[in-house]
Image (cartoon, rainbow, N blue to C red):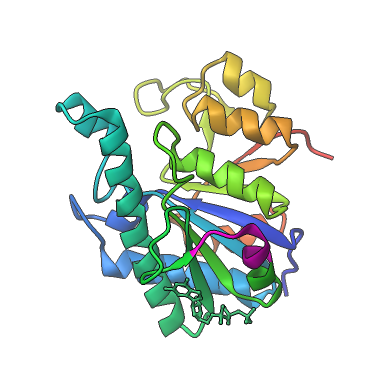
Amino acid sequence: MKTPVYKRVLLKLSGEALQGRSSFGIDTDILRYIAGEVKDVHTLGVEIGVVIGGGNIFRGIEAEANGIDRTSADYMGMLATVINALALQNVLEKLSVPTRVQSAIEMKEIAEPYIKRKAVRHLEKGRVVIFAAGTGNPYFTTDTAASLRGVEIGAEVLLKATKVDGVYDRDPVAHKDAVFYQTIEYTEVLTKNLKVMDSTAISMCRDNDLPIVVFNYEKKGTVKAVICGERIGTFIGVRK
Ligand code: GTP
């Protein structure tokens, strides 16, 4: 049996991941698939925090381009993450995985407020904690929320689940000779302006020594394989 090399992880899922083949909203088949991937890791005894984006429902940046104030657009995006968090919670619980949703914006009827110490307690008790509403502030992405929560809860790694295999020096779709990085340091990601996560998120991880693994979640078992130490995707940070 595979054994995990991490005890506590923060998994970042984009909202688009939940969209699957649809052009908008939540594809329940994909949601069940993702929940199954989380369950497989949970079964190994790994403590899991999840930060989920909201781009399948609302994209703040596009709304701003269409004339909505950035602040309002970002709050709308944060509300979208709450919808996704509730959906993931529901499906995970149907798979008998205990979960708690904590929201960075207080909405007590729907979710617990974000309280770091309570989140850690939940993790210790084996609950998957889904962090909703980003950081609770405009101008911050959900990637930054993932690095912030990852650092706060003492995660050993930030797992960024994406639709690409990892980090390349150029867009691999447009450039056939794009070079794939197996390992790259935070500063190189910043100086080369590699669009894997925004610079705030990368710097937060760098300054707090939180490694990031960028990988493609679409192949079944990948999350588990990454957590069990297989060299999949791109490792951002300093390998020890
Ligand atoms: P422990 O007592 O530490 O084991 O944690 P617990 O989460 O089981 O206990 P608690 O009594 O805090 O929560 C019981 C249930 O109520 C859980 O499903 C929580 O997610 C939920 N809950 C707790 N606080 C809030 C809140 O402020 N708002 C909402 N909507 N649910 C809450």
What percent of the width, then of the height, locates residue 216?
48, 48
Return the residue found at the far top.
191
* Relative depth, front residue between 137 and 82: 137
Q: Is residue 161 visible?
A: yes
The reply, left or right, for residue 186 in relation to residue 218 is: right
Task: Please identify the quarter of the rendering in which residue 10 is found.
Answer: bottom right
Is 47 drawn above or below residue 195 in the view shown? below
Q: Residue at x 72, y 55 (%)?
A: 229
Q: For this rendering, which residue is in front, 110 or 97? A: 110
Residue 172 in the image, given as x and y percentages of width and height: 42, 27
Residues 50 and 4: in front is: 50
Horizontal arrangement in the rendering, residue 133 relative to residue 131 (left or right): left
Q: How many marks?
A: 0
Q: Bounds of the magenta span?
A: 113-120
Q: Residue at x 41, y 45 (%)?
A: 163
Residue 176's x, y, as percent? 41, 23
Main SS of the magenta part reads helix
Is 133 located above or below residue 183 in the figure? below
Magenta residue check for 54: no
Q: Residue 226, percent across and down?
A: 64, 55
- Quadrant holding the N terminus: bottom right
